[in-house]
Image: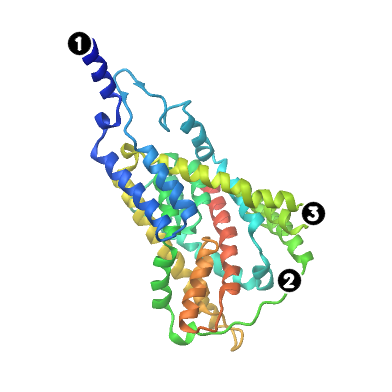
Amino acid sequence: MDTILDSLRQFWQFTGFANCTWQHLAMIVIGLIFITLGIVKKWEPLLLVPIGFGIIIGNIPLFFDPTTGVGLKIGLYEEGSVLNILYHGVRNGWYPPLIFLGIGAMTDFSALISQPRLILIGAAAQLGIFGAYLLALLLGFAPNEAGAIGIIGGADGPTAIFLSSKLAPELMGAIAVSAYSYMALVPVIQKPIMLLLTTKKERVIRMNKPRVVSQREKIIFPIVGFICTAFIVPSGLPLLGMLFFGNLLKESGVTKRLAATAGGPLIDVVTTLIGLTVGASTQADVFLTGRSVLIFGLGLASFVIATTFGVSFVKFMNLFLPEGKKINPLIGNAGVSAVPDAARVSEGVGLECDPSNHLLTHAMAPNVAGVIGSAVAAGILLGFLG
């Protein structure tokens, strides 16, 4: 009888019920919220559903004896476990360049090539990164941590993961979840700022139809674009190289199978793995801290700053542009790197103000410029903080 009771006691101590704390339950609730937002609200479901389920996986209470170091060896932070091996792609920065390869293979840079002046809007929006960097320094974060936090303002999850893996791996979970959360909330965050900073007259500005871009220009752009940006910030080479290479595969016309693989099955697999493992990295004892709350606050601030600078910079540009050449400031929000959601916000708000004024084509120019800009900004931060 005693043997049976001892066996039952031993079984109980290995169950999640015996090791559960309120922190585990809180994180599981957060994971359920992410899944609900992805399925019900359809807010970035390809990101929020894997991340939400990953959060639940990472917060199933596991047995661990700190005195003996004995555990089940299946947790994400336990060396050699399956989750730990999959997490190497995040921790060592393997996944983000592969995602950039897929993004390049899916992106059409025609809008930017036809209206090169709009690249300045994408550059202006990156000031959100450096604004958040300064705020993080003021709040007591170390320079490398502040740089990793600031990149959230680029609205680019893979870039945030890549930079935090190099500068502040201990903050990666909070930074990644914050970046992807705010990417999903782009319509909620940006619309009020856009309406606040613009007048009714500015919102109905009509822009000239972009010129048609030749196939030769599309092929030349990724080659010249990569050489120029890589020479300026060599530290951004892993992201920039894969982005422009993926685009060359798409536009060359002779590597359609490679482009289809990079922009389809490959990016889908990597997105699934990165979402699941980033979510699983948010274990309660690691994630539920005051620093995580600060990171989320700074992430929101960086988005607000980026959107504000993007819209305001268009208004500044318009001071020097003649009638008929002015830019609708509603596309200024698209300077962040959330492709194509930020551009869709520009289109949606524009149609609410004038149902016949379509801004999507124009907004895609600063939007894809923001992808390049966030990678360049990450390279700059890695260059002087790494």
Residue type at the position of mark 1: Asp
Dot 3 or dot 1: first in sequence order is 1
Asked if residue 347 is positioned above or below residue 290 in the image, the reply reads below
Residue type at the position of mark 3: Val
Q: Which of marks 3 and 1 is in front?
A: 1
Q: Are marks 2 and 3 in contact (CB under 8 Å)?
A: no
Residue 250 or 227: which is nearer the viewer? Answer: 250
Residue extending furthest toward the left: 2
Q: Nearer the viewer, mark 1 or mark 2?
A: 1
Q: Where is residue 53 in the image (x, y as percent from the top left)?
A: 41, 44
Q: Residue at x 44, y 52 (%)?
A: 48
Instruction: Report crowding for label 3: few under 14, some 14 to 19, many 20 or more residues within 10 A (C-alpha).
Output: few
The answer to whether 121 appears left or right of 116 in the picture is left
Q: Where is residue 51 in the image (x, y as percent from the top left)?
A: 43, 47
Label 1 residue SS: helix
Asked if residue 201 is positioned above or below residue 250 in the image, the reply reads below
Task: Name the disc covering residue 2, or none.
Answer: 1
Asked if residue 102 is positioned above or below residue 186 in the image, the reply reads above
Tag 2 residue: 213
The answer to whether 337 appears left or right of 135 in the picture is right
Q: Which residue is drawn at 44% across and 53% down?
A: 179
Instruction: Report crowding for label 1: few under 14, some 14 to 19, many 20 or more residues within 10 A (C-alpha).
Output: few
The answer to whether 36 appears left or right of 365 in the picture is left
Q: Where is residue 301 in the image (x, y as percent from the top left)?
A: 38, 61
Instruction: Report crowding for label 2: few under 14, some 14 to 19, many 20 or more residues within 10 A (C-alpha).
Output: some
Mark 3 and mark 1: span between their CA atoms? 73 Å
Dot 2 or dot 3: first in sequence order is 2
Mark 1 and mark 2: span between their CA atoms? 81 Å
Tag 3 residue: 254
Q: Which residue is drawn at 44% across and 80% down?
A: 198
